Image (cartoon, rainbow, N blue to C red):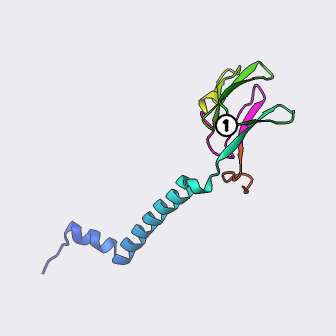
Amino acid sequence: MVLYKSRLEVEMAIFKPADVFILLSACFLTAWLYAVFWFDNAQQGEADSLLIQLADNEPVEYTLSKDKIITIQGHIGPSLIEIKQGKARFIHSSCRNQFCVFHGWLTVAGDTTACLPNRVSISLKGTLNDYDAIAGGQ
């Protein structure tokens, strides 16, 4: 008669086959949902224009089909916005921290960034915007 169990026997007693199945199913489901909802580009629409808004003024729309650099005079100084190959970004702003510049390229419809100290925001407009988790719509 054996008075003790091996470590493997104890560990196997902790995880029953149903536990292993549930754990593996949850891991697979998590990976699948992440891939579908985070990386699925079919849900993201192509952008066709750039909207630039300065403070309380009406937004100005630019096409993304022509490469150009736009200078916008903001609240504390100029902001430079680049349009290139259907994308847009801040390349310089008069703000101190340059968070708007570090944000990088806006690539799909619905992408938005802003230079809050300079009161300038840019966003891409297209046929199908990416989901907006805050507003709950498209």
| Residue drawn at 38 percent across, 77 percent down | 18
Q: Give the left or right position of residue 24, taking residue 48 as reference.
A: left
Quadrant position of the C terminus in the picture: bottom right
Does 2 appear above or below 136? Answer: below
Looking at the image, the residue that sits furthest to the right is 57
Quadrant position of the N terminus in the picture: bottom left
Does 56 appear above or below 17? Answer: above
Where is residue 3 shown, x and y percent of the image? 16, 75
Residue 108 location, quadrant: top right
Circle 1 residues within 10 Å: few <14, some 14–19, many ≥20: some
Where is residue 82 shown, x and y percent of the image? 66, 28
106 part of magenta stretch: yes
What span is colored magenta in the figure?
104-124
Q: Nearer the viewer, residue 104 or 15?
A: 104
Residue 104 location, quadrant: top right
100 part of magenta stretch: no
Can residue 81 be seen by looking at this rendering?
Answer: no
Can you identify the residue that label 1 sits on?
65
Where is residue 72 shown, x and y percent of the image? 77, 24
Q: Give the left or right position of residue 54, taking residue 18 as reference.
A: right
Q: Amino acid at mark 1?
A: Ser
Can residue 33 be seen by looking at this rendering?
Answer: yes
